[in-house]
Amino acid sequence: MKIRLQDLTKQYRNTTALHHLNLDIHDGEFLVVLGSSGSGKSTTLNMIAGLETPTSGYIFFNERVVNQIPPGKRDIALVFQNYALYPHMRVYDNIAFPLKIRKGRDIDQKVNHTAEMLGLQSLLHKYPKELSGGERQRVALARALVRNPQVFLMDEPLSNLDARLRLSARGELKKLQRERNITTVYVTHDQTEALTLGDRIVIMDKGILQQTGTPSEIYQKPRNMFVAGFLGTPPMNTINAEPCGIRSFISGESTFEFPVPLPVKKSCIFGIRPEKLTIAPASTPCAIQGLIEYVEYLGNETINHVKITPHVTWYAKDVAERGRVGEFVGLKFLPEDTHWFDPVTGERIAH
């Protein structure tokens, strides 16, 4: 199923939740819509589902306008953060319900296969009130997966699972989607889910689409300052930069040397990802000097908080060794790993 959103807008009284969204979702694609609360991601999903009506614009399913088609006739499966389970039905019947109302075949086989995939075999005889929050979420997910719809629509379906189950469920969900080749729109605020699940990611902010691309494209070449700061843990390091020579720039009262001639000739914002910085001796040529104020040891990696100016602290992610608090160090980097943004518009400057 191909889905196309054309100039889609949604207004609530004096608030515009979605601004003229144009988006093509490919047949069989796993598309993740990523954004914080109030970004418009759930509003978009609800309009695709038919739960909300666009103020203007069109929704196409395979070139057919579906704006006025009710949810039950769109051949979609919905999974939301709230469970929406039938309290008077056992887990087995909750999962089997969409198959029974459509008079599907092999119901028992399909229910048991889906339950096994999500670790629900021992819970099939229980009622929702007897389950934990994470178990209820898995039942809701199983109820959507048990049938074979043309579109999966998911609004943070794994948010109530613990870390271990969430990791397992992500893998199973992606595997199932690929096997069935079902067009999937997955809404989340979790960037790890977005990067690991999505064939493409759509990043939203305040109802406006910020960037669309593969996880690698968006992470490696963020379109603007918002995307650069939103995607990545820790976020991209940035600093105001005023060129003051062929290979140097000023930020505040500090001067920094660049390894090669600067790729920009005007005031801009200089950025680099924490994992692209290497801690070196403070005397290293062209390294950005700073004082390690704090060290986060995470087992497989270390995040060093390095103050490079009186008002700017950068993160340096290192998998090799820990820095020492109070140590004066240099932060080495490669010119090709740097990013430059316009200080007024926030847009990426090509170089």
Image: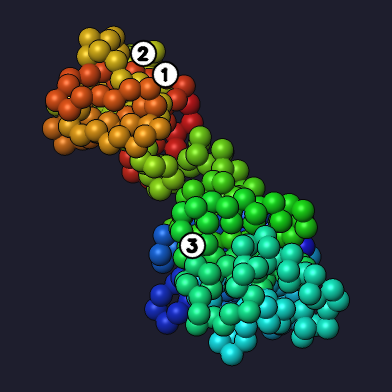
The image quarter in which residue 56 lies: bottom right
Is 280 on the left or on the right of 172, as rendered? Answer: left
Residue 181 location (% of width, % of height): 77, 56
Report the front residue among 48 and 302.
302
Which element type, helix, strand or loop, lies under badge 3? loop
Cα distance between the residues tagged 2 and 1: 8 Å
Q: Which corner quadrant holds the N terminus?
A: bottom right
Q: Nearer the N terminus, badge 1 or badge 3?
A: 3
Question: For the residues carrying marks 2 and 3, which lies nearer the camera in this image?
Answer: 3
Q: Nearer the N terminus, badge 2 or badge 3?
A: 3
Question: For the residues carrying marks 2 and 1, which lies nearer the camera in this image?
Answer: 1
Residue hosting label 3: 161
Which element type, helix, strand or loop, lies under badge 2? loop
Identity, as a three-letter code, of the amino acid under mark 1? Leu
Kindly check if marks 2 and 1 are in contact, taking CB atoms under 8 A apart as contact: yes
Whether residue 181 is situated above or below residue 304 in the rendered picture: below
Which numbered dot is residue 233? none
Residue hosting label 1: 334
> Residue at coordinates 53% horizontally, 69% vertically from top-left?
135
Residue 334 location (% of width, % of height): 42, 18
Residue hosting label 2: 259
